[in-house]
Amino acid sequence: MAIFKYSMAEVAANLKSVCDKISYAVTKRTSEYQYYEPRLVAISKLQSTVSIVSAYEAGQRNFGENYINELVEKAFSPLILEKCKQIRWHFIGHLQRNKINKVLSIPNLYIIETVDSDRLANALNNSWPKFRKRNDSKLNVMIQVNTSQEKEKNGCDIAQVSTLVKHVLENCSNLNFMGLMTIGMYGYDIKDGPNPDFICLIKCREKIHDELGIDVKDIELSMGMSSDYEHAIELGSTNVRVGSAIFGARPQKNNQKDII
Ligand SMILES: *Cc1c(COP(=O)(O)O)cnc(C)c1O
């Protein structure tokens, strides 16, 4: 099957358009959310390393992947190692504890956005010292929340978020808690009002503030994808995860071998 790929120039143009829309969305936020510039994470799952280099050379630094084997293959690929020395990898997929060493071993791992249980947090906390390059460096993590409460979605229960954050802060000295992440329900139409998953994540942050006394400015919100990143930013997202709007439609997972 022929797989349509964007050229370098097209990826660069898409990236610029997304960055422009982000800047515009920022101006529409209420003043309480004007204090930061959201981070754009280019989600490159099932896309080629050549596409990643195209975006990197156009200035993009944060990239996200959600399959462990694919992330490992890309992060160690000679092309990425040579051309993308400052890349920051975000792991955004479901992490099984028996795969932790694999993901922690990659060069330029920036954050695990999908910690959803104290057992996973403990396992990351225990393993990180074997992999970190500097003695004092902590592993950045976000807590994934199942805001849509769908059985097939990962993430901790809404009611458990504060307890899990408290656990990370008190018992996981090798982890740096950065914020909350949600995927949410697919296909929500914002004509019906603000996305309830985003509102839910904002409420979780307020609860953490109330119960643990952490300044809300120190709790990031990772929410928003290609279809709704501008909306998410208006509501206060600090980290949007955008794939197809930059790289085009993804090939099927079973065609992955053809593209790397
Ligand atoms: C694939 C994926 C994205 C990006 O999706 P697009 O709709 O292509 O922007 C964002 N977040 C997660 C967790 C994903 O798996």
Image (tube, rainbow, N blue to C red):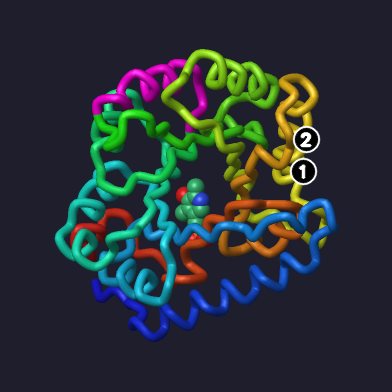
Q: Residue at x 47, y 19 (%)?
A: 172
Mark 2: which amino acid? Lys
Q: In the displayed structure, does residue 174 sit left or right of residue 191? A: left
Eyeballing the image, is 97 above or below 16?
above
Q: Is mark 1 within 8 Å of ligand 1?
A: no
Residue with the mark numbered 1: 199
Q: Residue at x 63, y 43 (%)?
A: 220
Eyeballing the image, is 11 above or below 238?
below
Q: Is residue 25 visible?
A: yes
Task: Tell which of 145 and 170 is nearer to you.
Answer: 170
Q: Which mark is residue 203?
A: 2
Residue 83 picture location, percent across and down? 24, 68
Q: In the displayed structure, does residue 132 sit left or right of residue 152? A: left
Residues at marks 2 and 1 touching, judged by CB atoms closer than 8 Å: yes
Eyeballing the image, is 95 above or below 190?
above
Q: Residue at x 36, y 69 (%)?
A: 56
Task: Tell which of 22 and 174 is nearer to you.
Answer: 174
Quadrant of the image for the N terminus? Answer: bottom left
Residue 203 picture location, percent across and down? 77, 35
Q: Is residue 153 visible?
A: no
How many numbered marks are there? 2
What is the magenta range? Answer: 115-130
Q: In the displayed structure, does residue 193 sit left or right of residue 36? A: right
Mark 1: which amino acid? Ile
Task: Tell which of 148 and 128 is nearer to you.
Answer: 128
Tag 2: Cα neighbours inside 10 Å, few (<14), some, or many (≥20)?
few
Tag 1: Cα neighbours inside 10 Å, few (<14), some, or many (≥20)?
some
Q: Residue at x 67, y 21 (%)?
A: 162
Residue 148 picture location, percent across and down? 66, 37
